Amino acid sequence: RLQKGHKPPPIAPSHGAKKKAAGQEKPLSPSSASLSPAMTDVVLTQPPACPPPDATVYLTTKHADLAAAATNYASTLTLASLPELVEKILPVLANTDKKKSAEREAAAALVPAVSTAISPPAAAPYLVPLLRPLLVLLADKGGKAVQGAAMTAAVAIVDGWSAQAKKVIGIPILTGVLGTDMKWQTQAGALELILKMTKDAAEEIGTAMPDLVPGIAPLLCDSKAQVAGNAKAAMELLCASIDNTDVQPLVPALISALERPPEVEDCIFKLAATTFVQQVEANALAITVPLLKRGFQSRKTPVMRMCAKIIENMAKLVERPSDVAPFLPLLMPALERASEEISDPEARAVCGNAKEVLDRKSKGLGMEPEPPKAQKEVVIKAFDEIVPRGDKLKELY
């Protein structure tokens, strides 16, 4: 207790108070002025970020237990460290030196470990650039260990995506490695992922048949059993989304004809004999157009006439221009060429009529206006105004 009339001793100012008085206090963070008091408290109580160990050490070290090493390293990472990590992994995956196969395997093994440690949905956007190199790695000459690690990593990336991301992000990447310039192991792995995505997000992937079928159809008759088998399984699952009762009974014959070219003509005549009464949508057209393409390539007048008649009959039942839009670059030139080159006047007239019907439908003439749809460019622009993308994300989206 203080005696009466006795003043308490002055309290020495803290070191922080001295700095503040001298005008030397540093701001809490670049955005501290915009934070609410509650958020400022959160920022103040966060421990300082510790940089993770250098990824180079992990990648170049021979690990007795690679899975454990990957898990341990991944546990040191934060979301903010992923861009730098991906930049270090990409050149490792791209290195084709046989002596570096262990590093490629270590890099691939790190992907699922990182996804698990940080949370698949949170890590997913950062891992997107790794998917294509991992698919290429499925044909790596380093052996099955590298190839297996690459497939496990690719599955982990895809599993972290939402149903919408599987369609918007996944399909362009996967169809981009189905070409003849890719090794068969890469093609088979991409088809396996398409099959998986179709099972996990049937509704979203089912609406993307116009994007998928052109890449899958040529692989149905591939010389490699793994590729042809995966292509058939993917095509059958995709066709399950076709709800057109006129086309659905013909799906097995359509797939078989795409798989076995000698059956093309018979299947076209079956399709021409079908009476279409139900609305025709893009997924029904997606499975028939590759067959029609082969019919026009046969250069046989009866077959081309039947192809034109099928196009006319189906186009008449299209109610949205967007359903025929994906197929115009293939069908219109074929009809124009046939209507000019076929010697039979009646067959030329059939091709000309089909071309006119298809042209009217593509322009929406006599059809109800389509409801507005979200435009990718508009959505991205709106997000950029809130959270601007970095250079890497701009390459992807």
Image (cartoon, helix red, strand yellow):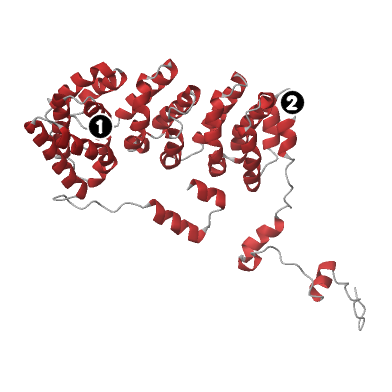
Q: Residues within 10 Å of mark 2 (few under 14, many from 20)?
A: few
Q: Is residue 57 above or below residue 26?
A: above
**Number of the label disc, if any, that sits on residue 62:** 2
- The amino acid beneath tag 1 is Val
Does the image show residue 306?
Answer: yes
Q: How many callouts does the rendering have? A: 2
Left or right of 138? Residue 275 is left
Q: Is residue 300 above or below residue 7?
A: above
- The residue wearing badge 1 is 289
Kind of element beneath mark 1: helix
Residue drawn 70% across the image and 32% down it: 59
Does the image show residue 278?
Answer: no
Disc 2 + disc 1, Cβ < 8 Å: no
Q: Nearer the viewer, mark 2 or mark 1?
A: 1
**Quadrant position of the N terminus in the picture:** bottom right
Q: Residue 228, how many percent across, how many down?
A: 39, 19
Q: Residue 115, how many percent across, how many down?
A: 59, 37
Residue 263 occupies quadrant: top left
Left or right of 77? Residue 264 is left
Residue 65 occupies quadrant: top right
